[in-house]
Amino acid sequence: MAESSQIVPEKTSLAIQAISDTGKSLRHWLPENVVPIIDYIDSTPILGAIGVVMVFFAIAFISRYFILASIERLLTKTRLEIDNQIVNHLRKPVFTTILYFGFALAVEVAALSVGSEIIINFLLSVIAASWIRAAFALSTVSLDTLARNRMQFAIVEPQTVPLLDLTIKLFVILLGSYSLLIIWGINPMGWLASAGIVGLAVGFAAKDTLANLFAGFFILVDRPYKIGDFVNLDSGERGRVTNIGLRSTRLLSRDDIEIILPNAIIANAKIVNESGGPTKSLRIRVPLGVAYGSDIDQVSDILHRVAGEHPELVEDPAPRVRMRGYGASSLDFELLGWIEYPENRGRIIHELYMAIYKAFAADGIEIPYTKTDLYIKEIPAAMRLDRGQ
């Protein structure tokens, strides 16, 4: 019976082996006068297990309520808010890791006849779960803090937070699942191979959806436009961006019609972002012509006056007048002005044309139009006979 009680299972998980190796390595770090006490504890496993639990509980308590608390108090003096939150979210997993690792080591010391491996694996699984939960909380808190301070961290925008948070959490789940499989002594390679086959099948079945998802990810990261920008596409769609999702982008056209574009299409299109310049203002052009013989200085003054009187043309940059050339029947001018909102372009150009026409008419400036002069060199004889000549 003595020999049978010392039989060790042939298959032991890596977690059990790590616990056992840790217990053995601790003996080398202890003072020589403590070794007899350790030998006595080894002869009484239950007493040794209780001692291990008490020691690790003390270490966990000190780490959480003294060391980490002191670090958190020091970090309150800094300007950053994120470091305090990180330390606060690390207190529980650090405490759980130390305490439950002590429980696992105590189970190893107690040398239970049955169930040791299951108990140790369960305790280590709790440790892994606590870190997964802490990683979830840290991901959300960190991204929200970075988004609120986007002047310093320009890569994180409010609309990219959900996507980045989801990506980080998926990575944490994969890493945590891999750790749990290792803890329970399960070879993850078979699972990974099966997941690869399933992923390949899903990729072929939903390639369009995945293309939109990947395109949406790169749109959110590359940021060719943002919510509120007025964009034009080479396919003819134009409007203000109202929503950027993982699958599609939504535009509100000037006709108040919502246009939903799959991200895979819009990612490969030529995009003209009229709100993406160094300033929010946009330049408009008003081409026009005056008759030959007009006073060009007077024409320039009239155009400057009309532009200055319009309330929606910004003062900086100031409106400009340019003479562009000599036309077939006109002197060609162009009035240049800047407006704040691209969607108002059509209405403002209309109002400028109306004001220019009235100003030219009041000052006697002729706007040329097509004229045809017919000269009759000689009246045919047949026409003279018909008229009785």
Image (tube, rainbow, N blue to C red):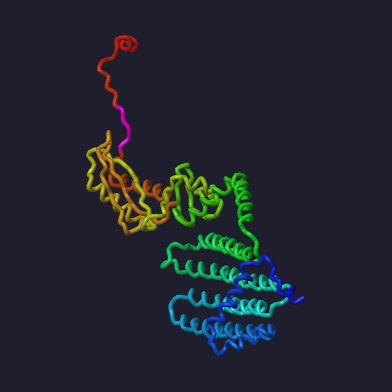
**Residue 374 sits in quarter:** top left
Indicate whether 164 appears above or below 378. below
Indicate whether 113 appears above or below 54. above
Q: Residue 186: horizontal and vertical position, in percent?
A: 65, 61
- Residue at 63% across / 56% down in the picture? 191
Quadrant of the image containing the N terminus = bottom right
Q: Is residue 371 at least partly visible in the picture?
A: yes
Q: Is residue 251 at least partly visible in the picture?
A: no
Q: Residue 284: horizontal and vertical position, in percent?
A: 36, 49
Query: Observer-nearest residue: 27 or 317?
Result: 27
Q: Residue 122: horizontal and vertical position, in percent?
A: 67, 71
Q: Main secondary structure of the magenta part?
A: loop
Residue range of the region highlighted in magenta in the rendering = 368-372
- Residue at 62% across / 58% down in the picture? 188
Q: Residue 129: horizontal and vertical position, in percent?
A: 62, 70
- Residue at 31% across / 28% down in the picture? 372
